[in-house]
Amino acid sequence: MTLFHTDDNGEPLKSATHGRSRAERRRSLGIGLLAGSVLVALTLAVVPSPYVVEQPGPVFDTLGTVTVDTPVASTTGSQASADGTAAAAAGETEKTKIPLITITGAPTFPTTGELDLLTVSVLGNPDNLPSWMEIIGAWFDPSKAVVPASAIFPPNESQKQRDAANTTLMIDSQQDAIAAALSNLGYDVVVGIEVAGFAESSPAHDVLQEGDVITSFGGTAIKSVQGLRDAVAASGVGVPAAFTYVRGGVSSEATVTPVDVGGHAVIGIGAKAKYDFPFDVTIRLDDVGGPSAGMMFALGIIDKLTPNDIAGGAHIAGTGTIDSEGIVGPIGGIRQKLYGAKAAGATSFLAPASNCDEVVDHIPAGLNVYAVGTLEDSLAALAFIEKYGDKAAEMNATTGTLATCQN
């Protein structure tokens, strides 16, 4: 039985399958690799990842305007008025530009320049997660951050709950910003600290009610939530402390004994500052949540209320929480906000000093960053920038007048 073919001399013939050239083998390998790459690319483009992407969001000038939806107004004339009334009744709205900050009941002054607040937007949600291709692209983009979806969207919290929490934080931050600005201008606006709820087994539950306003604790006047914490800590665990509070316009005295929770003396209440403003300050910023715009709100209010044009025509951006005493706190997404500021055209950036570890080595070219810990620090930075203009960063490098995250 012949297992192979022979030629006329009896020598075996080479099989056609063994006779492929090197070029043919390379071509086959290339086609295989290309097909595999296409398959991987299609998979990466379609298969969702367990991550979302934080990226720079919209930028808003606190000295400028915002576009909001307002009800359609009725016009003159009987038929036009009827049509307008019908439109309003139908819930129709129109786009209108209004100041982001409106002040009534006090004189205001012209401003120049821009004081931008920054936001962070999130690409993806639990119902529509980014593909692996989008995640890989974000990893190589310095303006973006890849984070686990569960870190932004906790599985035990609904979207409605998240939106409500962010809205509450924004409203509280606006009130704190107004208080910080007016306090800086010499107004006494802090009434005390309002009881917003109770922790389980709170020692204050039998003494206080929600809505009560604590005005002093242990003989110390209370002007901020942190001030109350400090006063409780100074009183100590297990020691009855006297305090005053206002309920229904009537001031009363009582005692409470702080307990130990995690090594801290607490009285087990949720609290927020209670203010009494001498005139109306309205901040309008729809569809933006969280507390990180507080410092920039405060600067915008001060600029509008003072004849000194603190922005001085410069384009300045910044971020940071703020309390009624003007303390600037850390925020999330600082790197995305740096790149958002740069893209918006800002040349100077005010960053919370407590975020400096995230700022160093991540500053976009052409953006000068100053570290601030208080509202006074921010005002000092604006004054320095106004004085030296385009030479401010160079002058600061020489004099070291302003803190930066590098120094």
Image: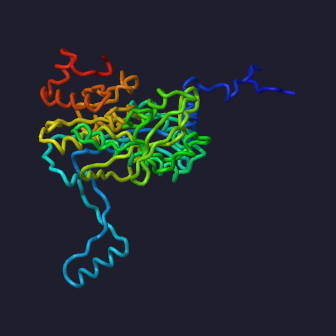
One can see residue 38 in this view: no
Q: Nearer the viewer, residue 264 or 136?
A: 264
In the current view of this chain or complex, which residue is farthest to the top?
398
Q: How does the figure colour the protein chain or chains?
A: rainbow
Q: In this view, does 395 lie above or below 193?
A: above
In the current view of this chain or complex, which residue is farthest to the right?
1
Q: Nearer the viewer, residue 1 or 292?
A: 292
Q: How many labels does the image show?
A: 0
One can see residue 191 in this view: yes
Asked where in the image residue 76 lies, by quadrant, the reply is bottom left
* Left or right of residue 156, residue 366 in this image: left
Residue found at x 12% / y 38%: 308
Q: Which of 127 and 397 is in front in this view?
A: 397
Q: In this view, does 401 lie above or below 89?
A: above
Asked where in the image residue 219 lies, by quadrant, the reply is top left
Quadrant assignment for the N terminus: top right
Q: Where is residue 195 in the image (x, y as percent from the top left)?
A: 47, 46
In the current view of this chain or complex, which residue is farthest to the bottom?
78
Residue found at x 28% / y 37%: 343
* Left or right of residue 34, residue 362 in this image: left
* Left or right of residue 267, residue 168 in this image: left
Residue found at x 22% / y 32%: 379
Q: Where is residue 22 in the image (x, y as percent from the top left)?
A: 57, 23
* Left or right of residue 169, residue 107 in this image: left
